[in-house]
Image (cartoon, grey):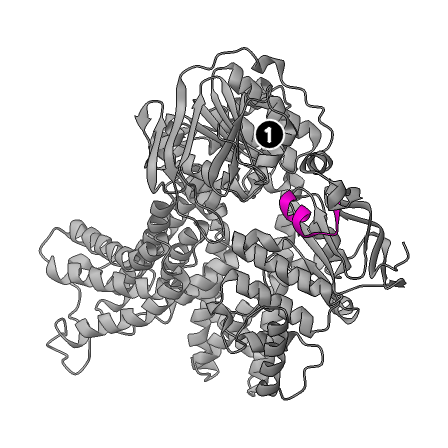
Amino acid sequence: MLSSWRARLGWSAVRLLLTVVVVLGVFGLFLWGLGRDPIKAYQDTFRLNILNPRGLAGVLARMAPLLLTALGVAIPFRAGLINVGAEGQFMMGALLGTWAALNLEGLPMGLHLALVLLAGMVGGALWAAVPGVLRARGWVNETITTLLLNYLAPLVVGYFVFGPWRAPELAFYPQTPEYPASARLPLLFGTRLHLGFFLGLFFLLAYAYLINRSRWGLELRTVGGNAEAARRLGLPVERWILAAMMLGGALAGLAGVAEVAAIHTRLKLDISPGYGFMGFLVNWLAFANPLGILIMAFLIAFIASSGFTLQITQRLPYAAVNVLMALILFTVLAKPLAQRGKR
Amino acid sequence: MAETPVLRLVDITKRFPGVLANDRVNFDLLPGEIHALLGENGAGKSTLVKIAYGFYQADSGEIHVHGKKVEIRSPRDARRLGIGLVFQGFTLIPAMTVAENVALFLAELPWLVRPKDLRKTIWEASQRYGLELDPATPVWQLSVGEQQKVELLKLLLAKARILIFDEPTKVLVPHEVENLFRVFASLREDGYSLVFITHKLREALTCADRITVMRQGRVVGTVRPEEASEESLLQMMFGERLVEVAKAGTGRVPGEPILELRNVCTKPIGTAPGLEDVNLTVRAGEIVGVAGVSGNGQRELGDAILGLLRITRGRKIFLGEDATHWPPRRLIQRGVAFVPEDPLAMAVVPWFTVLENLALLDPRRFSRLGGLALDWSGVRQLLRAGFAKLGLNPLPERARAGTLSGGNLQRLTLVRELNRPYHLVVGLYPTRGLDVRSANAVRQALLSAREEGKGVLLISEDLNELFSLSDRIVVMLKGRIVGEFRPEEADLTEVGRVMTGAGVVHA
C-alpha cells in the first residue's frame, strides 16, 4: 500500500517536472521568436519574484485570492460539480463586502472587518446559490450557468460603481469611496502581503481536514463519487449540491472582498486580473488535492507576477502571460491521454 | 433437407468477461422461412444475431450464407451479403424525415440525392408491404411502431434478403403486433427469410415456421409450432424442474405485516411501465419473491418501496404507519435495507476504500464531535463483526471498492445493509451476474434475515432461486401483479406461463 503511494507520488513529481520543462521550453521558443532572450527573461523573473523578498511577498499576496478561488472550485468539484463561476462569485463577494464596508462604519475595528469579510462570503454564496438551486432541481447544468453568471457579475458591480456608490471626489472615475480604516485588511511588513494570505492558508487546512476526516466531507464526496448510491443511501443529495456550490461561492467571494479590502481599498471594475479563472486552473492542476492546491497556487501566482516583470524587463504585453498559462493548461489536459496510452 | 439454408451459423462461441454468451451454437435459416428464436433474457439470442450481423465477432465458429462460408467483420459486410438487423433500440435520427433516414442507410447513395426519386421509391415499397409511411414526415413525429417500420424499410431498400428482428414486439401494443405479423407474412410470400427474436411463447407459436429455443447460451432444440405446445416450450426455456423448496420455509406462520402496498400506482418513465394498482404485503419472517421478465415494473416496485419513485396513487404502509411519501432517508432510518443488482453503480463509491464505504451505512452513527470527526475504529469493528456474522472473511479495509470483484462488492453491501436496525430488506436482482459462491452467500443472508423475523422482498429473474427461497411468489407483467403462487403448490411452468403473458391467473 505504502510503496504504491510512494510510486504514485514519484510519478506525479516526474510528470510535474516534465510539464515544467515542456512549458518553459515552448514559452522560451515563443520569447525567442519575438526577438527576446529567453534565458535572460527567466533569470530576471526568478531573481525579481523569488530571490527578492518584496517580490516574493508580492507572489504570496497573489496567492491569497488564488488559494480561495481554487478552494471555491475544489469544494463543488468534490461534490461532482464544475464551478466555472469563481470569477463572478469573486466580484459579487467584493460587492456585498463593499456595502458592509461603506455602511457599517463606526463599529469597533475587528468587528467591522469581520462583518465585511462575512458579507463578502455571503455575496459569493448567494451568487453561487443560483446555479446551485438550478442544478439541485435538475433543471440546468451548473457549468453553463456559472460560466454565464461571470458575464453578469461585472455588470452588476458596474451599476453600483457608476451609479449609487460612485465616489464624489473622483467623479470622472467609476469607483466607490475608500474603505474606512476599520474595514481594511492589514498589510504586513510594509509589503503587499496581507492577512488574506493567512485566511487562504487557514481555509486550505480546514478543507484538507474536513473533506477527508469529517462526516460532512464523507457525505459530500459520496454525492460526488456516486450520486445514485448517495440517493439510495438516503443522503440529502439536493441539499449537498446546493451547499457545495454555496460554500465554494463563499470562498471565492471572500477572495474578492479580501482583495479589495487589502490591495485596492475601494471597489472598482478592474479588481481581478482573472483570479476566478486562475483558481479554476489551479484546481484542475491540483485535482482538488489540498497540497496540490498549495503548490499550484504558488506556481500560478509566480507566473502571474512574472507577467508584470516581463512587461517591464522585456517590454512584453501582459497578454504574453496568458499564452504561458494556456500552455500549462494544454500540457496538463494532455495527461489523461498519456495515461490511457499506458494502460 | 433439400434446400440450402440462406444463413447457417456453425458452432458459434462467444465469451464476454465472466459470461459465456454463446456456447457452440448451431442455427440455420431456410429460404422463405420465419424462424423464431425463443429464450429468457440473457439466453444469448441477441448476441447470436449480432454476430451474424457483424456487430460482434465470434470467438470461434463459422458463418455460411447461401452455402458459402463467409467472414462478417462489420455490419457493412453483413449488409453487402444481404443481411439486415432491426435493433431493439432504433438507430434513426429524429430530426430527419423518413426519406432522409432511409437515404442515409443506402449503400449506393449518389452524390446528389434527388428527393423526388427517393420519395417515390419509399412510397412504392411501403405500399407493397402495407407499411403506410409518408416519406416527408420527420421521424420524431412517428410512434414507436412506425419507427420500426422505417427501420424495416431501410433494410428492404438496401436489398437485404435476410431480415433479423431483435425483440420487435417488446415496444409494440397488441394491435401493432398483429400488424407486424401480417407484414412478416407478406415478406415471406416475397421470398424473404426472417429471424424473429422473442421471449413470448404465444408470438413464436403464432407466426413462426420453426422455433429454436436457447437457454444459457446454448440451443436447447428446434421445433415446428404444430409439434410444440406452450408446456414443452416452457420446459425447454427454463430447463429441468429440479427445484428444492427450502424446508425451513414450509409450515411456518408469518407474523405481522411489515410492508403493505394498497393500489399503488406510479407514472411510467420512458418505455418503462409504471406500477398499476399494485397490492402487496410482506410480513415478518417471510420472503416474498417477485418474478417477471425484466422491464415489467419490478425495478419500479423496488424504487417505489424505497421512496425513490413517487407514488401517484394508493398507499404504502410501513410498520403500521402511512409511509406513502416518506423520503428514502426516513425509510432507511425506520428500517428498510436494500441490496442492489449492481453495487458499483447503485451502492458504493468506486474510489472510496472498503472502510469509507462501510461508514456510509449511516454517517451520523459514526459521527463524532458533531460531525467534525468520524469514529473509524467503530467502522473497523463493524467490518470485523459484520463479516464474521455472515461467516465471511473481512475484506482489506484500505482496498478501493472499484478494484473489488462483483462478489466481494456484494458482500460489502450485504454487511453494510444488514447491519443497520432494519425490518425489511429489498433485494433487486441481488444475485445477478454473481458467481455461484457469492450468489449463495447472498441467498444465505436473505434466509437468515427471514429466520430473524425480518420481511424480505426478493426481486429476481431466476425462477429456481425464487422457488427455493420464497414463501410466496408474485408475478409482474406490465406494471401489474398478475399472479400469486406458493412455491410448494405451483410449478415453474405455470409461473413461466404467467410471466410471459400466456395466461393471467387471479390469485
Q: Residue at x 61, y 62 (%)?
A: A335
Q: Quadrant of the C terminus of chain A?
A: bottom right
Q: Callout 1: residue from which chain?
A: B
The residue pinned by badge 1 equals: B411
> In the picture shown, does residue B379 fall above or below B171?
above
Residue B204 picture location, percent across and down = 67, 48
Q: Quadrant of the N terminus of chain A?
A: top right
> In the picture shown, does residue B247 fall above or below A28?
above
Residue B223 picture location, percent across and down = 78, 44
Left or right, B54 with respect to B352, comes to right
Q: Is residue B466 visible?
A: yes
Residue B8: image quadrant is bottom right
Residue B124 picture location, percent across and down = 62, 78
> In the picture shown, does residue A308 fall above or below B69?
below
Q: Residue at x 63, y 57 (%)?
A: B181
Name which residue type carries label 1: Arg
Helix, strand or loop at disc 1? helix
Q: Nearer the viewer, residue A63 or B9?
A: B9
Left or right, A138 with respect to B493, comes to left
Where does the magenta region start and end?
B201-212
Q: Can residue B437 be found in the magenta stretch?
A: no
Mark 1: few/some/many CA within 10 Å (<14, 14-19, 20+): many
Left or right, A104 with respect to A12, comes to left
Q: Nearer the viewer, residue B139 or B412?
A: B139
Residue A259 picture location, percent across and down = 29, 63
Q: Residue at x 47, y 54 (%)?
A: B270
